[in-house]
Image (cartoon, rainbow, N blue to C red):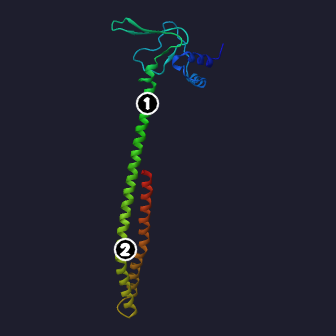
Amino acid sequence: MAPLREQVEQGLKQAQIFAGLSPAELQSLAARAVRKLFGPGEMLFSEGEPCSGFYVVTKGKIRIFKLSPAGREQVLAVEGPGSSVAELPVFDGGLIASHIDQAKAKEHSAIAQARQAEYLITRRIADASLRYDQAIRQLDILSRAQPTADDAFALVWTRFLGGGSATMLEVLDSYQQAELLRLQRPDQEFAAREAVAETNLLYGHIR
């Protein structure tokens, strides 16, 4: 007796629905097929049940019937070896529809994730833009305040050297104020450049 896999492959080869498959494709299909044996009068499936696959008849016959409202059997077809049963529900509301639903769910999930990522990137761009504007405003303030602070220091220093009323404490204080403004400028310039670089990088992610 041939091994079970070969028996399944031979059975599938009889089916008209698989007539165009190559030997390799039949072998691949046989590896996924499940062999089932049914006794006389045993039900394969009933109307209304979810479809999990279809059947290929390799031996014997299958009677397909429908019950009338009065409970009488109405025979729709009798299928023998080489016939396939329940293949339509697989492609119309069964396995394929299930796979399509799963694909749609994954697509919706991917779209939601993409929108969330785009939202987060937009928020980061807005934050970088705000930091850039703040840095530019600070640089403008420093540019206008620096000459005034330098002039104030020069005046106090001149008064101190000329023996005027300026004290060393006033000289040090005016010098520190001028230097503090000067030291703040590189920090603000760096903040502005950093914001521009981050914005360019984030725009590259959403293009």
Q: Secondary structure at mark 1?
A: helix
First in sequence: mark 2 vs mark 1: 1
Residue at left offset 42%, top offset 51%: 206
Residue 76 at x, y percent in the picture: 41, 9
Which residue, given by chain and number where applicable, does mark 2 sit on?
Answer: 142
Of residues 17 and 109, which is closer to you in this image?
17
| Callout 2 crowding tier (Cα within 10 Å): few <14, some 14–19, many ≥20 | many
Q: Nearer the viewer, mark 2 or mark 1?
A: 1
As drawn, 186 above or below 107 = below
**Which label is found at residue 100?**
1
Residue at left offset 38%, top offset 90%: 158
Residue at left offset 35%, top offset 8%: 68
Q: Quadrant of the N terminus?
A: top right
**Which label is found at residue 13?**
none
Residue 179 at x, y percent in the picture: 42, 78
Residue 163 at x, y percent in the picture: 38, 94
Q: Is residue 131 left or right of residue 21?
A: left
As drawn, 173 above or below 185 = below
